[in-house]
Image: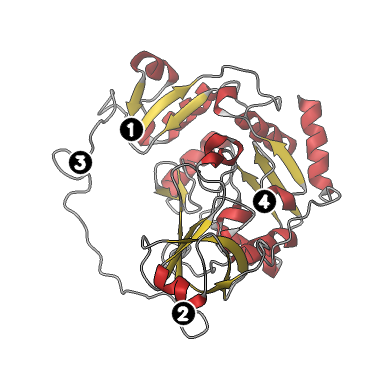
Amino acid sequence: MGSFPHELPGYRHVSNDAVRKSFEADWGVTLDPEPGLRIPNMIDAALEGTFKGIYIEGEDIAQSDPDCQHIVAGLAAMECVVVQDLFLNETARYAHVFLPGSTFLEKDGTFTNAERRIQRVRRVMTPKGGYQDWEVTQLLARAMGHDMHYTHPSEIMDEIARLTPAFAGVSYEKLDRLGSVQWPCNEAVPQGTPVMHVPGFVRGKGRFFVTEYVPTDERVGPRFPLLLTTGRILSQYNVGTQTRRTSNVDWHSEDLLEVHPQDAEERGIGDGGWVKLESRSGTTTLRAKITERVAPGVVYTTFHHPESMANVVTTDYSDWATDCPEYKVTAVRISPAGIPTGAHGVTPIFKSSLGCEELSDLVCQIDQLA
């Protein structure tokens, strides 16, 4: 749906004049043919003073993104930070304005899964915050001078079908009748496409590109001899904004640092003891879990709990082509810690005032519009 800064819905580049003009005609606006910024670029630009504000819906970048100190410094440098979510997460601590989000039980719409299957979601209760997510976005757009006007999510789907060839045949009527469809769904395949690339690939035979291998700039050495890799666990989802508020904490109540017995013995670290984890970016403490599940020279932890804030130690190095952060290769050192001290260098403090006068005015306008 155009979630990349360089693409409009349907994986079509913003520099394509014909594609861009179709959206401009439908929306009544002029679109920039140049790609926008990815999150790491936004934070860098904020620290440079050229990126002034951000509207974050359903994401907790202060906990999930690498080098947390860099992230929160960028958020603090902005003039206006708006967070819209179900709960007050770590990013909300740096927000000037917090807007309540709505759960799947409180809204109409669709989910499209990794199988390309589009399925209806039907509201079963009135949103506790008063509005569904799309209504909040629409009210903000109107308050800012853009007359965005939908009365139901089905109209948004109609717009998607109108502007995006792979969804041209999708409608709420069809979804209600068939239960679900898989895109592409258009005139050529009106019932959707259960399996793609049969009997061949859309673009013909595969196209291969030879690219030069560019190794990471992160290196282990005498000061930081171990390699940290991070990941997820089944019982918690990402930064745990929702799952940590459930009985799932009975299975995973804290982030643990998995250490190979050989590395633990060399450093005097015992199973269940507190460990100081340091990198070139930051420091935190976690409880140790001695296990042969990790190889010698490698330590592993999850990043589900803000108390440990594991991403305070990961670096801001990223892939040259996609800007994907290098969560898997951070040079670290570990040592016994007498008491748990949490993450160092990130001070989560709620702002005492809104500070962003313009957006405060917009919130008032939203109430008036409602």
The residue to which callout 4 is attached is 91
Does 9 sit above or below residue 149? below
Q: Is the residue marked by circle 4 packed among few (<14), some (14-19), or many (20+) residues within 10 Å?
A: many
Residue 231 locus on image (x, y percent): 45, 55
Which SS class for mark 2? loop
Give the quadrant of residue 298.
Answer: bottom left
Which SS class for mark 1? loop
Q: Are marks 4 and 2 in contact (CB under 8 Å)?
A: no
Q: Residue 147: tell me if it is visible.
A: no
Amino acid at circle 1: Trp
Which SS class for mark 3? loop
Residue 206 locus on image (x, y percent): 19, 54
Q: Which of marks 4 and 1 is in front?
A: 4
Rounded to the nearest angstrom, the CA distance separating label 4 from label 2 is: 32 Å
The residue to which callout 1 is attached is 183
The residue to which callout 2 is attached is 225
Q: Are marks 1 and 2 in contact (CB under 8 Å)?
A: no
